[in-house]
Image: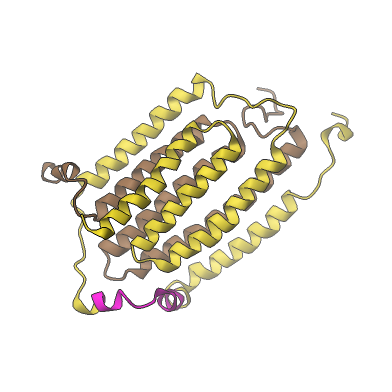
Amino acid sequence: MSMHWPLLLQAAGEVGLQHYLVVSALVAGLGIMVVITRRNAIAILIGLELLVNSVGLNFVAFSKFSSPDRFDGQVVTLFIIVIAAAEAALALAIALNIFNNLHTVEVDEAHSLKG
Amino acid sequence: MTFSDGVFWVFAAIAVLPALGLLLARSIVRMAFLLLFSLAGFAGLYLQLGAGFVGFTQVLVYIGGILILFLFGVMLTVRIDVPVRPRSGPRFLVPGVVAGLLVMGFLLFVALGTPWVLHQPTAEEAARALAPDPPQIGLKLLSTYVLPFEAVSILLLAAMVGATYIARGSEPIEERGE
């Protein structure tokens, strides 16, 4: 494994698979941070979208660089985009309903069960 | 560094830097607009990878659809009479950043430390790489991936009906004797 670490030092070299994986890893980490630190339900959803996007980039990058058929990963990414759209629509509907009932979308205030 | 590599670095910066801004932004509207730039950066990276159809689907669905949905959600749920609360107390700020850094470090470790098997394209595949991709993707969707395609169609219909049902007007809480 140590043979591959010098790749880190030539980060500005020719762009390859690992460059895309690094972009994806950075965005995934930032997405997790946004999801955990924010309190507004819509901000949490925005962090989730970052996570979903970083996964999609991985699929396309792998299908380009290490698969004989470059379309397989792209089709999976299309499915991911569709499911993300369905998830966003449902989650926003739930957020609107919570706001209608509790007059807040801050997730730590939206509790009606005591405990 | 070739021109193509330079384009990658530009789009990578457009994708990552607004994501960093999302963590620091104070207002939720600003977050939505930073997400726009990040998604546009991802669309550029898809184009850079030769996935034109996915890239433009990203622009259509994410930037044209989901982002507008978020802006509607923000406008419908932000209360003007309540001052903007700080992002988060230290109770969640520290564990959140630590968890994010752990995940990021692990993914970077895997991405940079694994000897990925790279596929060397043959001459025929290299020639096909320049062909337009929507017909190829259409064929794949209706042959190899026809079952997931139909499953996703049903999921989308169910999500649409469900979202309409959940978001329908309901009586305010005080009318129910709260």
The structure residue drawn at horizontal position 72% and vertical position 55%, both measured from the top left corner, is: B164
Is residue B71 shown left or right of residue A28? Answer: right
Q: Position of residue B111 (x, y in %)?
A: 26, 46
Q: Position of residue B76 (x, y in %)?
A: 72, 42
Chain in brown colour: A
Judged from this view, the residue extending furthest toward the left is A3
Quarter residue A9 falls in: top left
Chain in yellow colour: B
Judged from this view, the residue extending furthest toward the front is B3
The structure residue drawn at horizontal position 51% and vertical position 45%, both measured from the top left corner, is: B35
Quadrant, the C terminus of chain A: top right
Magenta region, residue range: B125-140
Judged from this view, the residue extending furthest toward the top is B90
Quarter residue A28 falls in: top left
The structure residue drawn at horizontal position 26% and vertical position 59%, both measured from the top left corner, is: B3
Is residue B82 shown left or right of residue B139? Answer: right
The relative height of residue B37 versus residue B118 in the rendered view (above or below) is above
Q: Position of residue B65 (x, y in %)?
A: 59, 57
Residue A91 seen in the figure = no
